Amino acid sequence: MTIIDNVLDSEVLAQSEDAQHEGNTLSAAGAPIEKSSPLGYKVTLLSSVMLNIGQILGAGIYSVPGVIMNSVGSVGLLFVFWLLAPLFALGGLMIYGEFASMFPKRSGAEVVYLEQAYPRPQFMVPVMFAVTSVLLSFSATNSIVFAQYALTAFDVPITPGRQSIIAIAVCAVGMSFVALSTKWSLRAVNFLTGLKVLSLVFLVFTGALVLGGFTHISDPYANFRSPFSGSTTNPNSLATALVKTNFAFAGWHNAFNVIGEVHTRDPVRTVRKAGLLSLLLVTCLFFFVNVAYVAAVPKDEIKNSGQLIAALFFQRVYGESFAAQTMPIMVALSCFGNIIAVTVGQARVLREIARQGLLPYPRFFASTKPFGTPLGPVCLKYFLTVFVIVALPARDAFNFLLDLSSYPNLVFNAATAIGLWLLRKRQALAGLAPSKYRAGNIYVSLYLLSAVFLLIMPWIPPEPGHSDVSFWYATYCVVGLGVLAVCGFYYWLWIIVLPWLGGYTIVEEVDRLEDGALTTRLTRKYHPSVETVDNGEQQPLIAST
């Protein structure tokens, strides 16, 4: 292993020049660019589309429509929100496309974009994003919904103990695919995503049968009369509904997390096209699935369905027939596929954080040994998921985790939108041409405004009976801000206070691993006035072996 100072290493400097030329942007800072990905190049347009759809088609469409209806109060607003969410996602997709064109060799998406957009104060934004990402990198929501639907499919009563045991087990199986083989994890995503799409097509077809009068549903158009009757104007309820629909569409960016592993001639074009295709397909499916729900299930029952709206839908249409027993299994498989797809992308995010030098033992988390996969990040994600599943009350776990994971990310979404404008300004000052995938300002503004709205509105009290948890409605906002406050304190202590007290400066070094991976290591460079350390001696800032 060779350790090279980041400032003096000629190869790293050459890679920065390559990045500047290929991305037509300012020289890249932060983690070193890996010219050849140690994770390989197994991602195609098809697998990019499947990674996106695989994450989007998780628990959301089967679990949140009832919660959304309870929040907004009317069928009309339910449909409006299912059309608003993809518009905001489209804005984010355009932003990510422009960022990716600037840094085409860096996987990890947002972790890279924030690192490049906010180089000063040094390490601050990367540290805050890193700590938040690690703390919230769990897959508990889909694991919990898998457990609920699996128990329902076999007519087993849902208890907190059973739910937790099954959730932990399915998480272990799903993540083991990603830990052991990238090729087989992508194949599993492709297969399961195909099943998920077919299950939604079947659900839409069933809705068409209901509307056509071919089922025992006596009046399928009852909920469509006076569609906006009962609509709420409460900002908290509207924000809750938007959080839930945004959650259902989460995953449109998943392919950007693996852009460094795309083997097409233009990886940016590939992942951008994959995002557009997946977003278009899922928007159509989601809208007509909600039409099917509304046609078959009375409005009040939808409101009270919790996370089991799909099971309720098939029970009302097919009774206790084979189809009613099959659908919960399909939903459970959908959640299982989501766990794999999310882990594929998020493991790359955690690996990029390690390559920035912001995790203890960065060589372990950046390494791809022994299977050519990000084994360390996958293990970290699994242990965090287990902790969250065990720590939270089963009754409120799904809604609380969904809300909690979204709130700090909204801050970073806003920072990403603003960061794009900052990078454009720096590019213009450097005399560099705009990206050929430049996002229109309308998309940037739309993405920013949606984040700001969702940060502010949840603080307004909801109407009685419309909160989605049994405890204080804004708990997730406070906990989310608390996570960010912990990040800020950690940065202040680690990067400012301790170096001042210890008489050293933090410098970056590059480690080259045996598998070819490159990772940054933050070390202490003590000042000459510190008598206990020789002049120029450097020691690791955090554990690195």
Image (cartoon, helix red, strand yellow):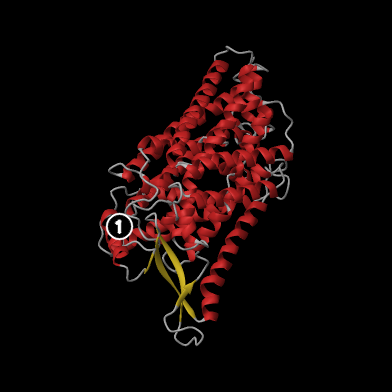
Q: Position of residue 254 (x, y in %)?
A: 45, 43
Q: Position of residue 202 (x, y in %)?
A: 52, 21
Residue assigned mark 1: 19
Depicted 488 relative to depicted 314: above or below:
below
Res 415 visible: no
* Image-based side of 457 in relation to 159, left or right: left
* Image-based side of 194 in relation to 215, left or right: left
The residue positioned 65% from the left and 28% from the top of the image is 299
Please name whichever residue, 309 or 224, is drawn nearer the observer in this view of the structure. 309
Mark 1 is on which residue type?
Ala
Tell me the quarter of the picture where residue 168 sits. Answer: top right
Depicted 111 relative to depicted 285: above or below:
below
Depicted 326 relative to depicted 104: above or below:
above
Depicted 64 relative to depicted 524: above or below:
above
Please name whichever residue, 31 or 285, is drawn nearer the observer in this view of the structure. 31
Identify the element where label 1 is drawn: helix
Q: Position of residue 493 (x, y in %)?
A: 56, 72
* Image-based side of 310 in relation to 103, left or right: right
Q: Position of residue 152 (x, y in %)?
A: 68, 28
The number of callouts visible is 1
Please name whichever residue, 86 or 312, is drawn nearer the observer in this view of the structure. 312
Tell me the quarter of the picture where residue 507 sits. Answer: bottom left
The residue positioned 37% from the left and 63% from the top of the image is 29
**Quadrant in which the N terminus is drawn:** bottom left
Please name whichever residue, 304 or 149, is drawn nearer the observer in this view of the structure. 149
Tell me the quarter of the picture where residue 399 sits. Answer: top right
